[in-house]
Amino acid sequence: MLTQAHLTHLEQHYGIDGTKCSQLSSVTAEEIRERFGRPDVEGGGILLTFNPQAPLAERIFRVRLDQPLVDAKSGRKIRYLSPPCQKNALLIPDGKTLDGDRLIITEGEMKASAAF
């Protein structure tokens, strides 16, 4: 379930109706620290779940942080995190398949959700 703040953010920044995306949910800073092994996280975020119908061990997760971290070496903002040792994955938004004539490749998960 998404908080009202996250629903508003998704609509305003990506044009995504978060009420129709079962792959997205709000998480607290504590949940992110525990699931992603990052004690430096100070705020919550939007959790993206790949393959939400698969058994838990087969699901892949990423989180978009409400309060980005800053990379100590480059000074760049870190907006997305994945759990340690997790493989990369292809996000297929809710209700979509690879059976059609059109394939849209985007740079990020939120953009993939917004493209449909």
Image: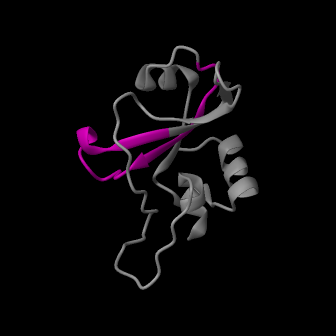
Q: In the image, residue 46 lies at what x, y percent?
A: 57, 40
Question: How many numbered tags mark residues here?
Answer: 0
Q: Nearer the viewer, residue 78 or 25?
A: 78
Residue bounds of the magenta highlight: 41-62
Tell me which colouring the rendered structure shows: one colour
Q: Which residue shows up at 47% across the image and 40% down it? A: 62
Picture quadrant where residue 26 is located: top right
In the image, 1: left or right of 9?
A: left
Measured as percent of width and height from the top left, residue 66 is found at 67, 33
The residue positioned 71% from the left and 41% from the top of the image is 5
Rendered residue at 37%/72% (across/down): 97
Q: Is residue 91 found left or right of 81 in the rendered image?
A: left
Whole-percent x and y of residue 53?
Answer: 30, 53
Q: Position of residue 56 (x, y in %)?
A: 27, 40
Q: Residue furthest bottom?
A: 101
Residue extending farthest right? 12
Instruction: Let me know if residue 17 is in the magenta part.
Output: no
Compared with 58, 21 (above or below) is below
Q: Is residue 3 above or below residue 44?
A: below
Q: Is residue 33 left or right of residue 45?
A: left
Q: Is 44 inside the magenta-drawn segment?
A: yes
The quarter in which the C terminus is drawn is bottom right
In the picture as drawn, the residue positioned furthest to the front comes out as 73
Position above or below: 21 against 29: below
